[in-house]
Image (spheres, grey):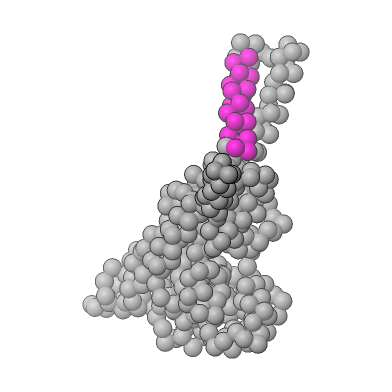
Amino acid sequence: MTGKKSSTVASFWKQLWQRVDPDLVPTIERVFDLVEPKLRLFSDYQKRLQEPVRSALAYAGELNNQLSTEAEINLEEFTSDPFIHALFARPENIKNAIGGSRDVQQYIKEQSSNSGETIYALMGMRYSEKNFIGNQTTHHGTVSDVLQTAAIFSDHTLTCLAANPTTLAQNICDHFVDSLFMQIKTDITEREAERRERETAQQVLASRIRSNKVENMHNAEHELLEIELRLTDLNHLLNYENRFELIAKTIESAAEHLKLTEHQIDIDARGVLRDSNHRLAGHFALHELDARDDRRWFIHKVSINAEHAKALTQERGEKIGESLFLREFVLGIQAQANSKNFTRPFMPAAPPNRLRFAIHGGQRTLDADITSEAAHTCSQSDFTLPIQ
């Protein structure tokens, strides 16, 4: 009897130790949905990721707390709020951001009878700067041929929609960790692609060596040895046990892979960066999502009037403005798009804006088909010569 009681007690404590926090289970399961479903074959897969996921969610909460409070975006605020005017070059951009958003359309469709008066969201936008020479108004009058810099915000997106700030914060935390999971997926995919390339190179080179079709046999054999050694390393890194360890370590070190940097941006009403308070529209605090490339992506919490959003989505109908990249890497919704060039979450790929000029009647003017946002924030008289 004593032995049976001891065995029962040991079994009870073992089950208690193996129990996973039910609040963490949905996030843990998303890891395997997004990265590698086959890793569920490990019997203790949830338990092994419980603490790393708990740590990552806590860090995502810290990032969310760094973001500023919600700014209301609508057409009326464009003329009265200098912050909204700074983020959108013209009113049409607000219409496109709200009315052309898949997420806004889907949210309104799902919450048609209970959407509330306000929709809360996380707005992302690509940030770039463009140097130009033009006129500048100072305390002493207008000065010509002054080197200036235009701040350009484009590719506005709305994600993490919610009916209240609390739910918005939770959605943002979830999507922060999802973007971390997608980074892991990208790393594994790149290693798998390298392994396939190395295997092909190994077969080709080995065949040439066997056929004695190489100019320098010693160099060819040395190259083949290097390929085989790299393949050994890749096979070791990509076995399922080590994949699991990679996932756990990356999630646990979330602070090294996902960062926010606050920027104080001082611009005037034309969207030009200023180093003085003269004609300054405001001092704006924005957060940049750090990444592995040189493209800059800023995020900010916003609120939208629900009726205003409904009207804009009805006006746009089925015309959607967001890229497949945002669908896959922000929301975790798989899209049929080539992912080999995707290097960061929360940001669509886009070429840099360019200011183009033409000569008309001996005068330099902005080209009629210019697409840069800066062309709408500064009048033609402000520009005389582009700086590359």
Above/below status of 374 relative to 233: below
Q: Position of residue 312 (x, y in %)?
A: 62, 84
In the displayed orientation, state which residue is furthest to the left.
140
Judged left or right of residue 161, residue 334 is right
Judging depth in this view, the residue of 288 and 93 nearest the camera is: 288
Q: Is the magenta stretch mostly helix, strand or loop?
A: helix
Q: Position of residue 111 (x, y in %)?
A: 64, 82
Judged left or right of residue 315, residue 365 is left
Q: Position of residue 373 (x, y in %)?
A: 51, 70
Q: State the count of labels.
A: 0
Residue in view at x 50 percent, y 69 percent? 170
Judging depth in this view, the residue of 140 and 58 nearest the camera is: 58
Occupied quadrant, residue 97:
bottom right
The answer to whether any part of residue 119 appears in the image is yes
In the displayed orientation, state which residue is furthest to the front.
1
Q: Where is residue 317 in the image (x, y as percent from the top left)?
A: 70, 80
The answer to whether any part of residue 356 appears in the image is no
Above/below status of 277 relative to 129: below
Instruction: Assess whether residue 231 is covered by the magenta stretch.
Output: yes
Residue in view at x 62 percent, y 60 percent? 332
Above/below status of 244 relative to 206: below
**In the image, which residues are magenta?**
221-241
Residue in view at x 26 percent, y 71 percent? 276
Instruction: Assess whether residue 163 is covered by the magenta stretch.
Output: no
Quadrant assignment for the N terminus? top right
Judging depth in this view, the residue of 293 and 23 nearest the camera is: 23
